Amino acid sequence: MNYVVSIGYVCADALDKSRKAYKLPYLSATDRRQEVSTTAFDALLWQGLASVAIPGFTINRVCALSNAILRRTTFGTPMTKAITTIVGLSTIPFIVHPIDAFVEHAMEKTIRPYYPKPAPLPETAADRKIFT
């Protein structure tokens, strides 16, 4: 059930970002379609990594380690499970920012340089700054 909520969040974020990209001005329908698609893909990939895959894996490994350590103690199974759950949940505030920064850096160095660049909008008179 947790992954259903997480994946729902990922899809909602991608939809939100692509709708915002759709509302921007473009030179052509092709440019709009390309930019909206790229925006949606980028959001799905970023959120999929930063909100689902990497945190899930990290918390799983922290729980597995804490469970392995706690099984060697005299705690019973219910106490071991409860402590393992508490340890896993308590890691969340500490892993969010490092994972976000890692995913941002990794995408900037790997896939984002290959995204198609939208055509620049023509300059209008209102955009020009005239210095006298």
Image (tube, rainbow, N blue to C red):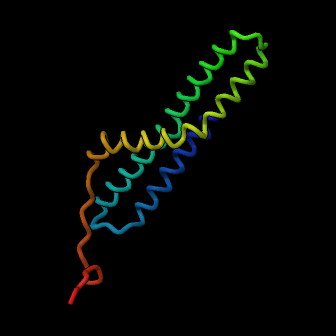
Q: Point out the residue furthest to the front here.
A: 73
Residue drawn at x 64%, y 14% as measured from the top left? 69
In which quarter of the view is residue 93 placed?
A: top right
Q: Viewer-proximal residue, 131 or 126?
A: 131
Q: Nearer the viewer, residue 113 or 83?
A: 83
In the image, what residue occupies the spot 46% across and 59% down? 19
Task: In the rendered view, tell whether residue 31 sits above or below residue 3.
Answer: below
Q: Position of residue 128 (x, y in %)?
A: 25, 81
- Residue at image point 31% right, 46% down: 112
Q: Quadrant of residue 109?
A: top left
Q: Residue furthest left?
A: 132
Q: Could you say which quadrant of the image residue 77 lies in? A: top right
**Split into 4 quadrants, where in the image is the N terminus?**
top right
Q: Position of residue 72 (x, y in %)?
A: 68, 9
Q: Is residue 86 positioned above or below 19 on the image?
A: above
Q: Position of residue 31 (x, y in %)?
A: 29, 60
Rendered-image quadrant of the C terminus: bottom left
Relative to residue 24, is residue 118 drawn left or right?
A: left
